[in-house]
Amino acid sequence: MTANPVHIYGPRFSNFVRSVMLVCEEKQLAYTVGFEVDGNNVAFKGEQHLKWHPFGKIPVLLEGTLAIPETASICRYLDEDGQLQPQKNSQIHAQHDALCALISIDIDKALVRDYLLEFAFPKGENNSIRFDVVKEAQPKAAAAIAIIEQLLQKETVLTSKEFTIADALLAPMLHYISCLPTGFDLIADYPNVEQYLANVMTRPSCQKILTAKEF
């Protein structure tokens, strides 16, 4: 990596953009964020974006001529010294990688794609929240949080005192869920998850990045 700031292509309110921002904060790496690259606006899912990520997803990490898609891969690249990952060639390292995949694929789908986004970008009449859609998705969202609750009852990287990439992936999701209206925030029903979020929010990086949504 160079000494120049890396650029995180994507909006600051994205939970995965925030994951990368958290890693940069923890690593004390200089970075910029947004759709403007080298003074030019790069359209979301436009030609250039699709060259960086063929499915038009965010974030994309830009460093010079290098473009890296996919959040977990970006985080591992930024963590070149392994500060935010268990020691390589160990079972714990493999478990951490598996947990990162679980969070970034299945848990993200249940909590963010299928549940939270209806609050963030309502698709009802006059941009109203479709509460029927929310209530239909709520059981799966609650089930995902229940899985996190179970993981926190075991000895995993989530229960260690060390902040890892897995934490950077999970914390923005949980923080957003905790900001939802009463009856939809779900977190209060799971004491271990609630305590976990309270713990990570004591970190300066989380206090700086995990703020109320900025749409």
Image: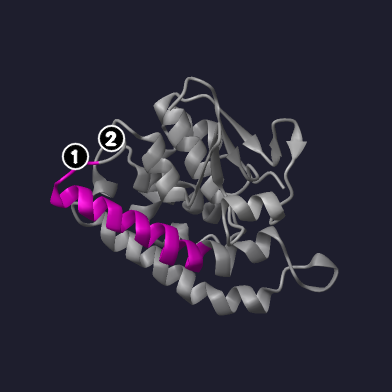
**Badge 1: residue crowd in 10 Å (few <14, some 14–19, many ≥20):** few
Single out the residue that lies furthest toward the right: 126
Q: Position of residue 137 (x, y in %)?
A: 55, 75
Tag 2, which secondary structure? loop
Disc on the earlier residue, 1 or 2: 2
Q: Nearer the viewer, residue 51 or 193?
A: 51
Residue stretch in magenta: 86-111
Single out the residue that lies furthest toward the top: 3
Residue pointed to by mark 1? 87
Mark 1 and mark 2 in contact? Answer it, CB < 8 Å.
Answer: yes
Indicate which disc residue 61 carries: none
Which quadrant is home to the N terminus?
Answer: top left
| Alpha-carbon span between mark 1 and mark 2 | 7 Å
Q: Position of residue 197 (x, y in %)?
A: 41, 46
Q: Amino acid at mark 1?
A: Gln
Tag 1, which secondary structure? loop
Q: For the stretch drawn in magenta, what is the main secondary structure?
A: helix
**Badge 2: residue crowd in 10 Å (few <14, some 14–19, many ≥20):** some
Q: Residue at x 44, y 43 (%)?
A: 74
Indicate which disc residue 82 carries: 2
Q: Position of residue 19 (x, y in %)?
A: 48, 44
The image shows residue 17, relative to residue 56, as above or below, that is above
Single out the residue that lies furthest toward the left: 90
